[in-house]
Image: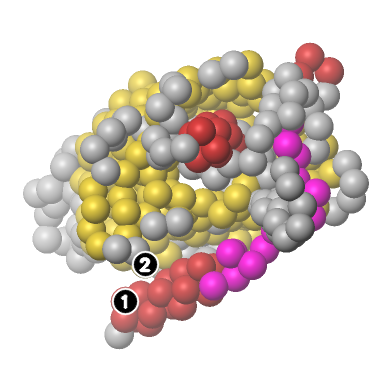
Amino acid sequence: MKQTQIALGVIVLTLGILSVVPTMRAAEPSNVDGNGKTIGETFAPDAGVSLRLPLQTGENLTLGAVTGSPDEAAEADKLAKELANPISSLISVPFQANEDWGFGPTGNGYKFTLNIQPVIPISISKDWNLIVRTILPIVSQHDLFYFANLPKDSPLQPQNRSQDGLSDTTQSFFFSPKKPGPFGLIWGLGPAFLYPTGTQDLLGTGTFSIGPTLVVLKQTGPWTAGALMNQLWSVIIEEHRSSVSQMFVQPFIAYTTKTHTTFTINTESTANWDATSADGKWTVPVIFQISQILKIGKQPISIQIGGKYYADSPRYGPDWGVRFNLTLLYPTGKRPEPIEKTGFVK
């Protein structure tokens, strides 16, 4: 019953996002790249492998790489660049599926996480945007806390081998200038929040946490390089739960090809400052990803695949994993096409 309610809630949330997002537009989006040059209008996700053979599935549905007119190619190129920038003026709704293996005392535990993480840019003045990034994780994990061959009189009996439901939600607010700063740097700064939305103890921290978040990057030609980080401290703690002090650091570098394919390597490292040295404080996955911008009808999307190797992880942490990401893209600030007036000769 609880899982059914969770599933219904997720469906309602997703439908709500998809109904609202297309109507939202940043009033004055940034149309400059990391060098301060104006960029033509576009539509943009993370890039991936170049698919040159389109798949015609019907009169109103075309799935394929964006390789049409020069305008469409320019738009796709801009979208790929915007997707590589975490604080661009692009509305996007990623559905990121992660599968990780090697958890637990037996080393046989595994964890599936679906992150629904909409990114909404809001123009708050002539020169500033507010970028709202939300991560809602839906988790199914097995044998993360399972000990094999425990005595029947062990206080750990009975063992709860599987947990399914929602984990804690992270929401970040980046105040970012619309034009790059000195040396072409793009940056955003603001608060980050961790909400205790975990549906059971083993899926969440049971704390409301807050702290600063920062992103800095530079885009030069096909390259994007930068880092995103936050530090969270618990301010409200549920009874019988422990406080949280953790840092997230994500350095990244991406290369976008002329076919709107983006190759990215990054780490999504987490430091748990409350953990003991014996248990291990750091989780450091090295992630390689390939993404491609496509269109379904008129809807631009990005499809991404990737692999993860854990260079460091805490005791009973994972060893490796894979990722698949589908991102819906809603470019902002589209200019209406000019209306041709009869009686005028061009």
Residue ID at (36%, 26%): 288
Q: Look at the numbered discs 1 and 2 and tell me whether their residues touch, using CB distance below 8 Å.
A: yes
Q: Dot 2, how many residues are within 10 Å of its Cα: few (below 14), some (14-19), or many (20+)?
A: many
Q: Dot 1, how many residues are within 10 Å of its Cα: few (below 14), some (14-19), or many (20+)?
A: few
- Say left or right for 109 vs 190: left
Residue farthest toward the bottom in the current orientation of the protein: 1
Question: Between residues 250 and 294, which one lies in front from this camera angle?
Answer: 294
What residue sits right under mark 1 in the picture?
Answer: 3
The colour style of the image is secondary structure
Q: Quadrant of the N terminus?
A: bottom left
- Say left or right for 136 vs 138: right
Question: Between residues 32 and 307, which one lies in front from this camera angle?
Answer: 32
Q: Is residue 294 visible?
A: yes
Q: Tell me which segment is drawn in magenta.
A: 19-32
Question: Between residues 225 and 28, which one lies in front from this camera angle?
Answer: 28
SS category of the residue bearing label 2: strand
The three-letter code of the residue at mark 2 reads: Gly
Residue ID at (51%, 55%): 93
Residue ID at (68%, 31%): 39
Q: Quadrant of residue 11?
A: bottom left
Q: Quadrant of the C terminus?
A: top right
Which mark is drawn over residue 165?
Answer: 2
The three-letter code of the residue at mark 1 reads: Gln
Q: Position of residue 36 (x, y in %)?
A: 77, 23
Residue 335 against residue 39 in the figure, above or below:
below
Question: Between residues 24 and 252, which one lies in front from this camera angle?
Answer: 24
Identify the main secondary structure in magenta.
loop
